[in-house]
Image (cartoon, rainbow, N blue to C red):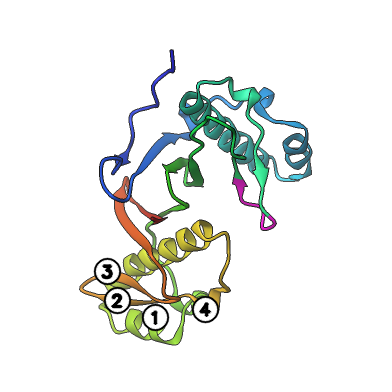
Amino acid sequence: MRESLPNPLFSTATSALGFTLIEKEQHEITPDFKVLDTLERVRYQRYLNPQKQLEFLTGRTFLKNVLAKYLDVLPQSISLSLTANGKPYLAKSAGINVPFFNLSHAAGHYLIGLSRYPIGVDIEPYRWVELMRFRHFLSQGEYQQLTELPEIEQSKMFFKLFTAKEAFLKATDKAYPLDAIQFQLNNQEWQLTCPESSFQFTQTNYEGCCITVCTNM
């Protein structure tokens, strides 16, 4: 009998968007080297920073355990394929409803999005930022709108924009260059103005972090 997924942090599984978010803290995940396949073990060894090794192993352990419960298989039996841009995915299998998924982690939070559609997720802790340091990340219009906000709101709205762009890049597998992606701030919400697309965004706050989910129906 299929083991149930962990309780979702946020779910719209019954809505048109149809995605589920699952979150765990780093201390709740026991890194398991056995879940890594041969190529993943090579990648693990290439990380020179022990913290980066731990983050990669923790993320893969969490991801494969979630997918294993979804597919009713063992975590170590899951082998992920990679797109040309390095985005992991599950190859389609006859008779199996393979989900789209995406993983993000920051500040000890690990987040997985599952969907019937292409999905990108991003999580970032809110903190003060100097906008000029991220000028390369912002269009002229985005930078102008941010600088026109009260200073106390600038960093918060920056991370709402930052996570939206990151989630879009991940959902589209970097199909667009950064300078081709533009948002406009309307009523305290960032709306994608370029490129035109059917992607939709959902944002929520969680333990001092901004989470953005980008899905395409």
Camera-nearest label, 4 or 3: 4
Region rendered in magenta: 84-88
Residue 76: image location, x then y, percent:
64, 23
Number of residues whose C-alpha sits closer than 10 Å to that of mark 1, classed few (under 14), some (14–19) or many (20 or more): some
Left/right placement of residue 109 relative to residue 51 reads left
Instruction: State the quadrant of the C terminus.
Output: bottom left
Camera-nearest label, 4 or 2: 4
What is the spatial separation of the Cα atoms under label 4 and label 2, in whole angstroms?
Answer: 17 Å
Number of residues whose C-alpha sits closer than 10 Å to that of mark 2, classed few (under 14), some (14–19) or many (20 or more): some
Residue 212: image location, x then y, percent:
38, 55
Q: Is residue 87 magenta?
A: yes
On screen, residue 190 above or below 42: below
Residue 154 in which image quadrant: bottom left
Residue 147 in which image quadrant: bottom left
Upstream in sequence: badge 4 or badge 2: 4
Give me the disc on residue 142.
1
What is the spatial separation of the Cα atoms under label 1 and label 4, in whole angstroms?
Answer: 13 Å
What is the spatial separation of the Cα atoms under label 3 and label 1, in whole angstroms?
Answer: 12 Å
Q: Which residue is mark 4?
A: 180
Q: Which residue is mark 2?
A: 185
